[in-house]
Image: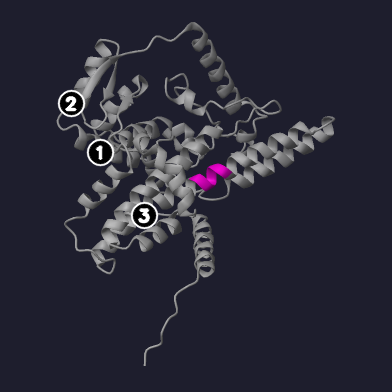
Amino acid sequence: MSKTVSPMSRSEKRKAARERRKKARERAGHVDTDEIVLRQVTQPITLPGVVSNMVAPILAPDRLPKESDGRSPPRRLVEKLRVALGVHALCVYHSLNALYGNSEKARDDVVDAAGMSFWHLRRNGAGHIGELTLFNDEDELIAWAKAKHEDLPVGAQIANNRLRAEAELSAVTLLGKTYVRAQRIFTAWEEAQTILSKAGDEAARAQAEEQAHGVIEKAYNSTGHDLTIGKLTEIAIYADINPVILWPQHISFFTELFELARFVGRINAGVGAELPTNLYQLTRLVMDGYKTGDTRDLVSEVARHHLAKAFPGNRLIAAIDAAERSALIVSVARGTCQINLVIKPTIEAGLIGRWQKIVSVLQAGFTRGVSLVERFFGTPR
């Protein structure tokens, strides 16, 4: 005789949801591994091409710490990740709902992957769908999700559907982990600045610097501190951020490649994109199949695959050549892969001075011996 299972009460459902979120946060600490070996930077951390029109603004802090040459990630980065996580979670929720035919299971799977309640995810993402996707609102997102899976039989028990579901959820899992990391690092820098601000005489200052360094080191060694280059490339594509802000050990080799991955991500999302002029030569090398013999080739391969698919033939390189001859910028229109050449905006003298100041601060922060970041990554050899 089969045993009857009584339905869960509301309090039991809330408790189960809390347990799922707790497990998701624990899983976020798991280090992803694959066959790619990370290349650690042991020489002085520098910013090649720091005066580029894309890299410097991204790495510029909201404010300069008064007591240290180190820099914390800007608060706007944490907010951007929060929004990106919410939008991706909504995309995946509607896709899984169409795939499963079960909205409750779709919601639970998304909550488990993100490590955040569905209410928070919806609140964070619903108003920003048009910023990160081709769609203007959630109704268009729902119609797209239904059309995407209309050729498949409904039911989560089908093996092929499970594989699709895992692929859909991978972006949410990765962005959830990145968001947690950004929060921890930002909080650690805030705590470190508070510690330094309370230091008194020279002896206390030295002790405070050591304590502040320990706080920052712990944050950088927390959630997802050793993600593979492949995962970092996905973060650049999904979240439209340069992951070297949170993984600065890769600045010397991957800054511009991750910027190219961001360009790819915006094209894939259909939201429109501009290719910064400092990436023109890199894009040529990538499209020509140039190989470095190290993990940079992995990022190049991903970018080349997507760019060749979006711009068959020699369209992109021809546009770059024409843009350089006329001092124009390559711009890809929203919703299409139509390439336009646009006039560079005029930069006011005051703004130029501001960027020069930012560049000098960045260069100082990455090279001075008292830099907390440089201390964390070891003494240069």
The residue at which mark 3 appears reads as 169
Q: CA distance from mark 2 to mark 1?
A: 13 Å
Whole-percent x and y of residue 203?
83, 34
Earlier-in-chain disc, 2 versus 1: 1
Type of the residue with mark 3: Leu
Task: Give the percent coordinates (x, y) of residue 187.
Answer: 62, 41
Q: Residue at x 41, y 61 (%)?
A: 108
Q: Which residue is label 2 attached to?
A: 315
Question: Which residue in the protein does label 1 denote?
Answer: 306
- Image side of residue 350 versus residue 4, left or right: right
- Which residue: 68% across, 44% down? 214
Camera-nearest label, 1 or 3: 3
| Element type at mark 1 | helix
Question: In front here: 139 or 120?
Answer: 139
Q: Which residues are magenta?
A: 179-183
Q: Position of residue 22 (x, y in %)?
A: 54, 61
Between 110 and 57, the one lying in front of the other is 110
Q: Does 182 lie within the magenta span?
A: yes
Residue at 48% x, 33% y is 251
- In three-dimensional space, the C-alpha distance between marks 2 and 3, rounded to whole angstroms, equals 33 Å
